Amino acid sequence: MLTAEEIMHKYLKFFEGKGHAIIESKPVIPENDPTVLFTTAGMHPLVPFLLGQPHPAGKRLANVQKCLRTDDIDEVGDASHHTFFLMLGNWSLGDYFKKEAIEMSWEFLTGKEWLGIPKDRIAVTCFAGDADAPRDDESARVWESLGVPKERIYFKGKKDNWWGPAGLTGPCGPDTEMFYYTGVKERDCDQDGCGPGCHCGLWVEVWNDVFMEYNKTKDGRFERLSQKNVDTGMGLERTAAVMQGAKSDYETELFLPVMEWIRSKSAKYDEKSARIIADHLRAAVFVLADDRGVVPSNVEHGYILRRLIRRAIRHARTCGISGSICGEIAEIYIRIYGDMWPELAKNREFVLRELWLEEKRFAETLERGMREFERIAAHCGGTISGKDAFLLYQSYGFPIEITEELARERGKGVDKHGFEEELARHQEISREGTKHKFASGLADFSEKTVRLHTATHLLQAALRKVLGESVQQKGSNITPERLRFDFTYGQKMTPEQIRQVEDLVNGWIRQGISVRRKEETIEEAREEGALAFFAHKYGEKVSVYEIPGASKEVCTGPHVSNTSEIGHFKIVKEEAVSAGVRRIKAVVEQG
Ligand code: SER
């Protein structure tokens, strides 16, 4: 029985033997590509080379890549779909093409010294052809030449047998997919249409060879690339399950210790929920371990991360787990994967802290939110209104996808369009109110952001006391969860300096100082020594917020009326943004 690690080593050894250079895995959060949020496939970091730029390691490459996709998120819970997964891949950059690629795949799958899968358990699919590209008879002929019987070769359209581009434009092409016959049906299906690609679980896709000879352009055309490439991807989790005869990926050593932990803590264990927890938290651990500044939030990467963590926590409740889950599960994953992926151990503390903070935030509102949801669901008829979905989002931190999922479980729908309108309307109100604020200023006026906003003024004052008057604000961004403050300073702050800043801020908070506001011209404000680093953004008259004895700043507010309302201030991160600019992330906790 092969372990995942052995499969990985075999794969890399096999392709090394065929003249491939083994390249490193890139981060899950792409380094230089704004078109997608996450690295969705091994080919993704290779796009420039698929388009023709020479790769320094040559024309034959292979690796194992950390990937994250959310398109299959609703499938997670079955035996073999994941958000985060590890993908074994090999590439030809204008070198070999269909014949050699397919022959190598076949040899690795069925060769005795490699995976040794019985040939009669394998079926394949090829592209059926359409207006953009012809039917792929060439691949089918190669499969036949290797002994795959005609009735095991299926032809399908773009939906099934075309891969890419990874973003909106870029390299793509027809593919041929390899399926393994599991012999086990997980779900009912239409008997007549059943075969490779059917969702019943009888056939599981293990490998995909993409023949990337097209480039999708901005206007939706498929033009020929200057070189014919091969891009293949084999999911490590699925392959491990196949090689171990496991009923699902979750029974392999890649998940098993986590699944056992979940079972041991569950008062009413539910397999599907347990799989969702295991999948989503593994994804969250790897995203955080990238340490690229992504933390749970309401936008972009941070929102996906938030959804993954919150959905896991919500499913933990379904299993009847009462305590917290994220920390212990993360520790298990760090143990399982830490040797292969040293960033997990290296960033352990950051990963654990961010998970802990997010779990704490959501746990605070989850029970009340669930009660509110039940109340809404009982009275809404068939559809939860946009307003109610927004209330659950705004006041109880329910990502819309969680509300939708809960509604589905009760046979109800959600007016998502109405929700989006509410969200946009709310953001519009916030934007109106913040028009004159800092470039990346306040996102809303909730009690939490207001508290953090006043804390930001105290933080700036404390930094100037501890690090010197040369400290200048470079940017500020506040979400209900945390403040982020960028400022000029040449070195990393010492733990002692961080503590001094926290102590100063908490001292002012404890003193219960009243916050004063007055209107004056920018010149008057400056004369009085108010900080106004963004003066060019203000009109004639400006508001000055003064916290006597601590801070005086030009700002449009809003602020708390007394510092005692802020809560306990804590710096959670201090890091470099660029040369000479540091970034602090801090939170306030109500005592
Ligand atoms: N890019 C293809 C896939 O993700 C092959 O790696 O399936």
Image (tube, rainbow, N blue to C red):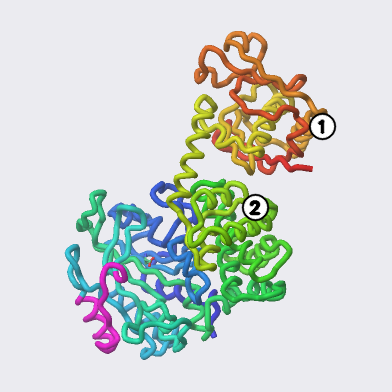
The image quarter in which residue 89 lies: bottom left
Tell me if residue 387 comes above or below residue 268 in the rendering: above
Q: Which residue is mark 2?
A: 358
Dot 1: element? helix
Q: Amino acid at mark 2?
A: Glu
Ligand 1 positioned in quadrant: bottom left
Q: CA distance from mark 2 to mark 1?
A: 26 Å
Q: Which residue is mark 1?
A: 510
Left or right of residue 385: residue 262 = right
Q: Which quadrant of the figure contains the C terminus?
A: top right
Left or right of residue 438: residue 503 = right
Query: Where does residue 339 sit, x and y in percent of width and height?
Result: 61, 66
Left or right of residue 157: residue 346 = right
Tell me if residue 240 comes above or below residue 337 in the rendering: below
The image quarter in which residue 276 lies: bottom right
Dot 2: element? helix
- Asked whether residue 331 is drawn in magenta, I would say no
- In the image, 421 versus 11, the foreground residue is 421
Tell me if residue 376 comes above or below residue 135 in the rendering: above
Q: Which quadrant of the figure contains the N terminus?
A: bottom right
Query: Where does residue 149 sit, x and y in percent of width and height?
Result: 27, 89
Q: Residues within 10 Å of mark 2 (few under 14, many from 20)?
A: many
Which residue lies at the image location 31% right of the left edge and 71% below the top edge?
Answer: 160
Segment colored magenta: 137-161
